[in-house]
Image (spheres, grey):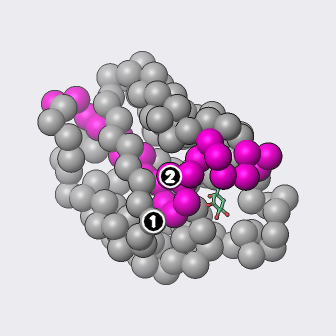
Amino acid sequence: MTTSTQPTVLVLNGPNLNLLGTRNPQVYGSATLDDVAALCRDEAAAHGWAVDLRQTNHEGALVDWLHEAGATRGCPGVVLNAGAYTHTSVALHDAIEAIDVPVVEVHISNVHRRETFRHHSYVSPVAAGIVVGFGVAGYALAVRGLATR
Ligand code: DQA
């Protein structure tokens, strides 16, 4: 997962989140994924953890990374912003259900104030917790949430 010997939180990002900073800034703000990594690292460091932040536009890669987290001894948890796959992916639901690692679902925007197709999540029923609508600060809140478990 990383060369770090510290317990490492996986922060997984799905489709289009590579465009954070330029994509619909009125919805997602101006912070980039690098800024998100810095926020997560600061919060994780307070708990003695490292962070491995990844992004993909491919559903199966998210499934593979969830399995990897499940197979990594001492992984404190996964922070997952699955983007649009949140609303479509039974495969992500099943992958989260199959692993024995807590997964916190994050959305930068308040999906419940948006289009109705964003109101349903396949991730939520198997998530350890959910952070929605706090902008990119939600990622750090999710790391903190993992630490309180
Ligand atoms: C999102 C919300 C999703 O509905 C959307 O498809 C995204 C980003 C969020 O962080 O607010 O890509 O997960």
The residue that appears at 54% across and 71% down in the rendered structure is: 85
| Image side of residue 107 versus residue 90, left or right | right
| Image side of residue 44 versus residue 75, left or right | right
Question: Does the segment drawn in magenta span residue 33?
Answer: no
Q: Mark 2 points at which residue?
A: 18
Question: x, y (%) of residue 127?
Answer: 52, 59
Q: Which of marks 2 and 1 precedes in the sequence?
A: 2
Question: x, y (%) of residue 11?
Answer: 42, 46
Is the residue 46 above or below the residue 101 in the image? above
The residue that appears at 62% across and 73% down in the rendered structure is: 87
Identify the element where label 1 is drawn.
loop
Q: On residue 57, which mark appears? A: 1
Part of the protein shown in magenta: 5-27
Q: Can residue 108 be seen in this view?
A: no
Question: x, y (%) of residue 32?
Answer: 56, 38
Q: Is residue 134 visible?
A: yes
Question: Is 141 in front, or is 62?
Answer: 62
Disc 2 marks which amino acid? Answer: Asn
Identify the element where label 2 is drawn.
helix
Residues at badges 1 and 2 in contact (C-beta under 8 Å)? yes
Q: On residue 118, which mark appears? A: none
Question: Is 86 in front, or is 95?
Answer: 86
Is the residue 121 above or below the residue 127 in the image? below
